[in-house]
Amino acid sequence: DQQVKQNSPSLSVQEGRISILNCDYTNSMFDYFLWYKKYPAEGPTFLISISSIKDKNEDGRFTVFLNKSAKHLSLHIVPSQPGDSAVYFCAASGKTQGGSEKLVFGKGTKLTVNP
Amino acid sequence: NAGVMQNPRHLVRRRGQEARLRCSPMKGHSHVYWYRQLPEEGLKFMVYLQKENIIDESGMPKERFSAEFPKEGPSILRIQQVVRGDSAAYFCATERGLNEKLFFGSGTQLSVL
């Protein structure tokens, strides 16, 4: 069961334009959402997060929007830069079957920013 | 990623052999998570450990897989009698305390021939 879905496996944008990465979730018990960025041969690195009590969080060129009623969040990068080219994972924080908090990840979206 | 050390970076095993993956947390971090990423998939939770304790192993396959985080030394993910389907990238992530930010290692790419 894919509780966190990133339906676009890839996205290509021009340098300077906006990149919009989308993520949908099914579990209404998720209360914290994160975006991680991953370069090849490296582990994911934390990018930005948002609590379920907010609908927007901004950090420099990165903004995350949360629409709880639609169970949808998105990451906006503006302006996009070639160095942003990476795989972006959406993650949600929720309880495991064992009762602890853990991150549930989507499959990722590969962003390519063309010069 | 700086500080969370995983080794080896690449591990090749033949079917039936054992694989041992190591994770040394960042200094001051006492919580360790193991995640597995199969090809074309996202990261899937496997196990959550604190020093000398397995807190949650609900994501671990029931057989052949085990994990430990001893009082001294790195956390170990052990896979016995590996099969081709075990080929994946295995990531360790650590945090200082519960619900704090996770820091990931660079992963171990396991290839089973």
Image (tube, coloured by chain):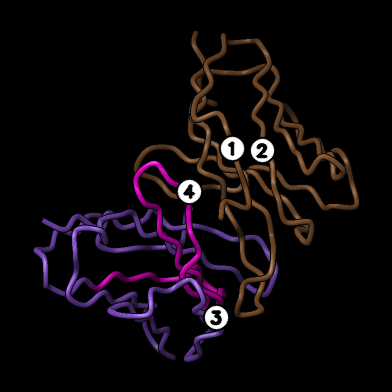
Chain colours: A brown, B purple
Instruction: Indicate the position of residue B101 as horizontal and vertical percent values.
Output: 65, 60
Q: Are marks 4 and 1 on the same chain?
A: no
* Distance Cα–Cα, label 2 vs label 3: 26 Å
Label pair 2/1, CB-CB below 8 angstroms: yes
Residue matched to label 2 = A23
Picture residue at 41% right of the left edge, 88% below the top: B70
Q: Which mark is residue A25?
A: none
Whether residue B34 appears in magenta in the rendering, the answer is yes
Q: Label 2 is found on which chain of the structure? A: A
Q: Label 4 is found on which chain of the structure? A: B
State the predominant SS element of the stretch in magenta: strand
Picture residue at 76% right of the left edge, 39% below the top: A72
Q: Residues within 10 Å of mark 2 (few under 14, many from 20)?
A: many
* Distance Cα–Cα, label 4 vs label 2: 13 Å
Instruction: Indicate the position of residue B92 as horizontal and vertical percent values.
Output: 44, 64
Residue matched to label 4 = B42
Picture residue at 65% right of the left edge, 20% below the top: A19
Instruction: Name the residue type under label 1.
Output: Gln
Left or right side of A104 for A32: right
User: Reading the chain from its start, which is encountered first: label 2 or label 1?
Assistant: 1
Instruction: Indicate the position of residue A30 as horizontal and vertical percent values.
Output: 75, 58
